[in-house]
């Protein structure tokens, strides 16, 4: 079972960006959690052509046909999270719906547990 789910809108946008950047379908989406932001922890998204790292004890999943890589530390914060994408008037971009977050900032880019 994957640690996260990815909405159809988010998956479509990820594939558009991946295509624009010239990355092929084997390139994984790396999702992480780093220190910083208003609430203490911030989400991080990037493409990773290298794949998993044994040193970081990466977890690798396939979510809706997309290879996703998450380091073990981030995996603990992200279990059960949904990645969504909004292109509406109230804000455009990726949004994490994280059941583990006890508090999020108003922009939704950082959280605390």
Image (cartoon, rainbow, N blue to C red):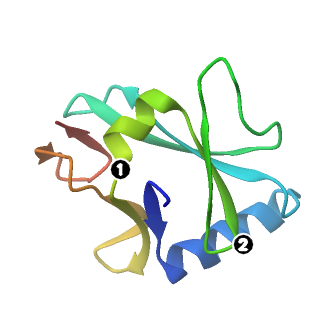
**Residue 49: x, y in percent?**
82, 43
Q: Which residue is rendered at x = 21% and y = 48% of the image?
A: 100
How many numbered circles are shown?
Answer: 2
21 to 12, vertically: above or below? above
Q: Within 10 Å of the Cα at label 2, are there few (<14), some (14-19), or many (20+) other Cα atoms?
A: few
Q: Quadrant of the C terminus?
A: top left
**Residue 27: x, y in percent?**
80, 53
**Mark 1–mark 2 distance (CA, rounded to whole Å):** 25 Å
Compared across the picture, whether 19 is left or right of 43 comes to right
69 to 2, vertically: above or below? above
Compared across the picture, whether 33 is left or right of 65 comes to left
Instruction: Out of 110 and 50, give the one closest to the viewer.
Output: 50
Between discs 1 and 2, the one toward the N terminus: 2
**Residue 106: x, y in percent?**
17, 52
Compared across the picture, whether 12 is left or right of 52 comes to left
45 to 71, vertically: above or below? below
The quadrant where residue 26 appears = bottom right
Q: Which residue is mark 2?
A: 16
**Most distant residue in the front direction:** 1
- Give the structural element (helix, strand or loop) at label 2: helix
| Res 62 label | none
Q: Which residue is mark 1?
A: 79
**Most distant residue in the left direction:** 102
Name the front one of labels 1 and 2.
1
**Residue 44: x, y in percent?**
49, 41
The quadrant where residue 66 appears = bottom right
Q: Is the Cβ of the residue at disc 1 closer than 8 Å to that at disc 2? A: no
Compared across the picture, whether 52 is left or right of 1 comes to right
- Give the structural element (helix, strand or loop) at label 1: loop
Q: Which residue is rendered at x = 53% and y = 82% of the image?
A: 8
Q: Within 10 Å of the Cα at label 1, are there few (<14), some (14-19), or many (20+) other Cα atoms?
A: some
Q: Which residue is rendered at x = 63% and y = 78% of the image?
A: 12
């Amino acid at each position: 079972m994957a640690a996260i789910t990815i909405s159809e809108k988010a998956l479509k946008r990820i594939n558009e960006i991946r295509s624009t950047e010239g990355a092929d379908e084997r390139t994984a989406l790396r999702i992480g959690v780093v220190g910083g932001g208003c609430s203490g922890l911030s989400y991080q998204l990037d493409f990773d052509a290298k794949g998993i790292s044994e040193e970081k004890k990466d977890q690798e999943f396939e979510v809706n046909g997309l290879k996703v890589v998450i380091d073990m530390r981030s995996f603990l914060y992200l279990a059960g999270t949904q990645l969504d994408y909004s292109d509406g008037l109230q804000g455009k971009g990726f949004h994490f719906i994280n059941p583990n977050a006890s508090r999020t900032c108003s922009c939704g880019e950082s959280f605390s547990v």
